[in-house]
Image: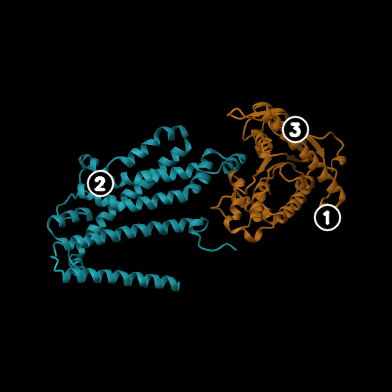
């Protein structure tokens, strides 16, 4: 515990030092604010425009969460189908690679054309880029069950559904959470990238990506920095959120999340 | 035990002229005939690759025979599954379930209602002496304890036939000996028929009423050795001369099978 506190305090000190160096450099070298604002300027504008900053953050978060949750639901569903019907998996699994390799930036205009700009298309972009890691990881977990465990279930006359839900799915939970962790990381990036293209359905109000583009066009570099900081915070929240969910479900039994030492 | 029974012994497992060819063409078993009467404890011994585990898989119906017939209590193995429990070499516990819920797995899969399940699980945990760890997860247990959980799970569905595939191979000798003694205690109590695969001659002699020695390439029955040791067998049995003589005899037979194999291999080498 003591070591942990020490680590946190150290990290904060280092962070503050970096900010200090940045501030000094900006002041001493007389860098114009539209090129590189100092942290104090960024802080001030963040406070001044706090409501719109938070609004952008929430809009992006909403799109990212919708896309992520949909990708989890659909990804797990598809993986269950893949695990249950091998022929189906052989035929369609290669297409998940297609999902991963298609340049999302290239199809963004199509998506906007189909579902209109704003939340819908941003969430859809997020969903598309989050889907492949979910399917790949979850399927891997579902099909890599020890043969003896399957035999054990068969010896007890287990049905296909029992094998799927009482054996394969719990076995795949660690992989499923790996998928969620990867997808959560790219969900925020996906939402912001989506907003760069799909923007907003209302002028002047949009998520972080849209606002970053807008601030950049207006040469509001200080606000742009505040938005980047907000995006980073959002990424952190997603990361720790998924970490917590993973810990909650796995800490009792899985080696990677052990909470105690075996006697 | 068998001398008390007047009627002819009932065949629990019969294999007649059984062969198993794998999909890659390798012949694992050829013309294996074996009959286990009710209440027998038969161990399968033999060098690796002689198809010991394949015999178990055929009897359990996990893999079909490619020749001959396998009958369990007069039924096909797949139809007789509710009579059998399979105990694997590793404990094959579900790491996400507590000891209690692992033991109850078979009963749960067989749709036994929760209260009845709880009662049975508690009984089984008592039987294998694991009541105090009911709420723990498998990773918090030692190898011997895991194996006990696995045995408790197998016994919970009240099998008549136990199929055991080197269940104690991964354990240290002391745990293995102790579990052997417990297994025999339960065997005498519950009157199972047991088909037991092992690498250990000492274990086979201690446990079995009969030992079947298999020869490899292709797997076939080389010797059938009845074990003439008095019941009940306890830790003391291992100290008797009769036990040592049996172990020596079976070891010699096993070595014979192995040297035969080695000779044939070197001869084959010269030809090639």
**Colour chosen for chain B:** orange
Disc 1 marks which residue?
Answer: B236
Disc 2 marks which residue?
Answer: A120
Q: Residue at x 65, y 56 (%)?
A: B145
Disc 3 marks which residue?
Answer: B221
Outermost residue to the front: B270
* Residue A257 as seen in the image, left or right of residue A188: right
Residue A222 vertical placement versus A96 (above, below) = below
Pointer 1 chain: B
Q: Quadrant of residue A245?
A: bottom left
**Label 1 neighbour load within 10 Å: few <14, some 14-19, many 20+:** few
* Residue B224 as seen in the image, left or right of residue B134: right
Q: Are marks 3 and 2 on the same chain?
A: no
Q: Secondary structure at mark 2?
A: helix
Q: Secondary structure at mark 3?
A: strand
Q: Secondary structure at mark 1?
A: helix
Q: Which mark is residue B228?
A: none
Q: How many marks?
A: 3
**Colour chosen for chain A:** cyan
What separation in Å lies between label 3 and label 2 (alpha carbons)?
70 Å
**Label 3 neighbour load within 10 Å: few <14, some 14-19, many 20+:** many
Pointer 3 chain: B
Percent x, y for residue A226?
21, 63
Pointer 2 chain: A
């Amino acid at each position: 515990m003591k070591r942990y506190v020490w680590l946190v305090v150290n990290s904060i000190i280092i962070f503050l030092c970096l900010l200090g160096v940045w501030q000094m450099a900006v002041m001493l070298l007389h860098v114009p604010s539209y090129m590189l604002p100092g942290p104090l300027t960024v802080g001030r504008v963040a406070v001044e425009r706090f409501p719109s900053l938070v609004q952008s953050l929430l809009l992006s978060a909403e799109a990212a969460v919708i896309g992520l949750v949909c990708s989890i639901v659909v990804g797990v569903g598809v993986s269950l189908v893949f695990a249950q019907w091998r022929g189906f998996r052989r035929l369609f699994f290669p297409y998940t690679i297609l999902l991963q390799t298609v340049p999302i930036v290239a199809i963004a205009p199509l998506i906007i054309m189909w579902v209109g700009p704003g939340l819908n298309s941003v969430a859809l972009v997020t969903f598309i880029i989050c889907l492949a890691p979910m399917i790949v990881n979850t399927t891997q977990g579902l099909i890599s069950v020890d043969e003896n465990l399957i035999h054990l279930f068969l010896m007890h006359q287990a049905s296909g559904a029992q094998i799927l839900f009482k054996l394969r799915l719990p076995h795949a939970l660690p992989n499923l959470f790996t998928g969620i962790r990867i997808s959560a990381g790219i969900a925020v990036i996906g939402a912001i990238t989506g907003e760069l293209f799909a923007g907003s359905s209302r002028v002047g109000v949009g998520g972080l990506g849209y606002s970053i583009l807008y601030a950049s066009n207006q040469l509001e570099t200080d606000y742009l920095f505040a938005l980047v900081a907000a995006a980073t915070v959002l990424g952190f929240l997603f990361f720790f959120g998924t970490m917590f969910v993973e810990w909650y479900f796995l800490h009792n039994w899985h080696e990677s999340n052990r909470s105690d030492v075996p006697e | 035990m068998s001398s008390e029974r007047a009627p002819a012994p009932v065949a629990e497992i019969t294999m007649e002229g059984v062969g198993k060819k794998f999909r890659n063409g390798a012949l694992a078993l050829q013309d294996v005939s074996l009959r286990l009467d009710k209440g027998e404890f038969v161990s399968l011994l033999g060098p690796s690759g002689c198809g010991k585990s394949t015999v178990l898989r055929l009897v359990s119906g996990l893999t079909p025979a490619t020749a001959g017939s396998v009958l369990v209590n007069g039924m096909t193995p797949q139809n007789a599954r509710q009579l059998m429990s399979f105990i694997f070499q590793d404990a094959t516990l579900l790491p996400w379930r507590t000891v209690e819920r692992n033991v109850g797995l078979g009963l749960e899969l067989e749709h036994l209602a929760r209260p009845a399940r709880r009662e049975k699980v508690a009984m089984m945990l008592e039987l294998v002496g694991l009541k105090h760890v009911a709420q723990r997860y498998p990773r918090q247990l030692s190898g011997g304890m895991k194996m006990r959980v696995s045995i408790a799970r197998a016994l919970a569905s009240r099998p008549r036939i136990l199929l055991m595939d080197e269940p104690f191979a991964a354990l240290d000798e002391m745990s293995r000996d102790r579990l052997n003694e417990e297994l025999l205690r339960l065997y005498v109590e519950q009157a199972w028929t047991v088909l037991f695969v092992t690498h250990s001659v000492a274990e086979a002699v201690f446990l079995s009423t009969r030992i079947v020695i298999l020869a490899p390439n292709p797997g076939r029955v080389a010797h059938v050795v009845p074990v003439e040791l008095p019941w009940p067998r306890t830790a003391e049995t291992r100290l008797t001369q009769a036990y040592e003589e049996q172990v020596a005899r079976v070891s010699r037979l096993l070595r014979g099978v192995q040297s035969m194999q080695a000779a044939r291999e070197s001869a084959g080498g010269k030809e090639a």
